[in-house]
Amino acid sequence: MRVSKWSERLFGTPIFDPVVTASFMIPLLYLVAFLIIPVLAMLAVAFEYNGSFSLHWFTSILTSDYYISFRPEGTFSQLITMPNGEQIYYVQGVDFGVILNSIIVSVSVMILTTILGTIFAFVMARYDFPGKNIVRILLFVPLLVTPFVNVFIVKKMFLPDGLINWIFYDILHVFPHRIVIDGLIGVIVAQTMTYYPIVYLNAYASFINIDPTLEEQAENLGSRGFHLFRTVTFPLALPGIAAGATLVGIFSLEDLAAPIVFQGNPLARKLMSFQIYSAFTSGFNVGSPQLAALALIMLTIAILMFLGIRKYVSMRQYAMLSKGGRWKPRVAKPKGWQAVLIYFVVLPMLLISIFPQVGVVLLAFSKSWAGTWPDGFTTAHIKSIITQPDIERVILNSVMYSTVAIVVIILLSLTASYASSRFKKSKLGPVLDSLATIPIAVPGIVIAMSYFFFFAKVFPDTPLDPTNLLGFNPAMVLVLAYSIRRLPFAARSISAGIQQVHVSLEEVALNLGASRWKALTGILIPLILLNLLGGAMLSFVYCMSETSVGITLGSINPDYYPITARMVELMTSAVGSANLAAALGVFLMTVQIIAIVLANVITKQRYSFIGLT
């Protein structure tokens, strides 16, 4: 056989192999065609002014007080008098402009979720206390994604007659006045309660993987308590914590649920994600270069956050010499004061944090909810899921979009992981690995915007043209967006499985005359089947609950709504029903619970439902 230098350079094989070549080229071409090129199409629009290259749109944004203001406007909080004469604290934050507001919210959520997630992870990883298994189950409740409805419940929790004021004002008398949150503060609180489990999962995995002898050595040298945690434990767990915090920052930046629910306050509308979304819903300015420039600014911030955290983590050494050995994680009975903190501080915090998901279920089965608690019981809203044709249609649409996307995701993640893991000498390997990972750092609303410009330009006046409002069929566009957005999660699962299968097993088959295809399908795939199925199921759940693309491109034509587009309509429309939206939320929660259970059973391990672990 003829040796090819270009094949060895590009694909890591001295002899041309069609299976290896396809493993590189299929995911590479797909990612270039449906991630890089659409972003470049949006880039071309953003940098064009009067028919020539210009920074005009970026300059107009970055010099406008509406987008960036170093002189904040408004009052962070104020004491207002209600019609009944009672005074309440109304907390909303101050306005720094759209871009700075988004950054401040994102950073605030990162800090708060890191604190909460790390506390819960440390308690669960290091202490053995009565009721721990129940707490472990409760910590999975906030992982259940119910777009819009859980934020709606968070907002109700902080109303004058909501749960928080009932506990801390009416019962414990901790608050001097009732507290109402709104605006940017409402967004921060809602996102914190939604995203802290991402940090928890990553931090927990990091804590239980720390070599206990390192902490024991520090204790022998006199380090104790918080000093030990600050100088040894936390630094060793930092890669996992930073990974979770990075995801939280990006998710916060792109989040639409909280700004939409709190949009009654003008401050909640002054976030980049909402500005782009509102252009879609209003139809005003949706295809403007200024909007494209704003989306690119959001993308730049997200990528800088992603790369910045990775750079910071890579500058320090976290390797443990005994990593790979067998040890028991340090688990101890809590001391008296530690037990008090666990049961009277940490556990109440957890119970409050899971109330949004509990509230979704209560709302779905309630007739009304005007005060602290829901009134009446009914199954009518749940029955509507299978009796109302429009609700049935959106569920079937989402199932169809997600199923097709999963087929694509499996093909892409399998080929990309196989190519980048098995052929490390290839020049294309690192490029492919980066392209398969980078969608984590790309906000969904940016993908929605880039697809809008790309498909409007490439397929004008066709069912793929988003500007063709009555004739637009978003099915293909949504499948493409889902497959790009959720690819990294399945790819990580499959890549981990491939790395656990020694390459010699495939080499033996090749030496005995088997083709590369036979070695791949007959040996490698059966050995990583559990990883493949686990990653596919979890990616399916992500696709079903996809929000950013679903409520923008997916909401253009009502006949093709996915679930999330119908949910936001129910939550914001004057004739909508929060109860029916909650019923759809319960359906999504059920799908997610089934996926978690099946993933755990299939993979024989506790799976990271959201995160980088």
Image (cartoon, rainbow, N blue to C red):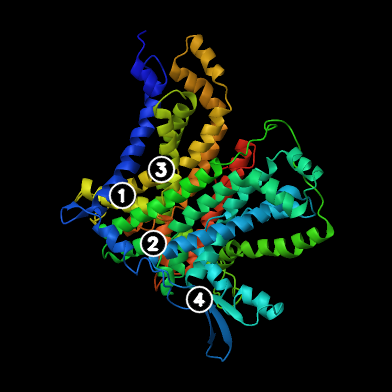
**Residue 483 placed where, x, y %?**
41, 42
Q: CA distance from mark 1 to mark 4?
A: 37 Å
In this view of the protein, can residue 382 be seen by the observer?
Answer: no
Return the residue at label 2: 272
> What's under tag 3, amino acid-wise?
Ser
Return the residue at label 1: 451
Q: Is 277 in front, or is 320? A: 320
- In the picture as drawn, the residue positioned furthest to the right comes out as 336
> Quick one: SS at disc 4?
loop
Give the mark, 1 or 2, whose residue is nearer the N terminus. 2
> What's under tag 1, amino acid-wise?
Tyr
Q: Is 224 in front, or is 400? A: 224
Return the residue at label 3: 483
> What's under tag 2, amino acid-wise?
Met
> Quick one: SS at disc 1?
helix
**Residue 451 placed where, x, y %?**
31, 49
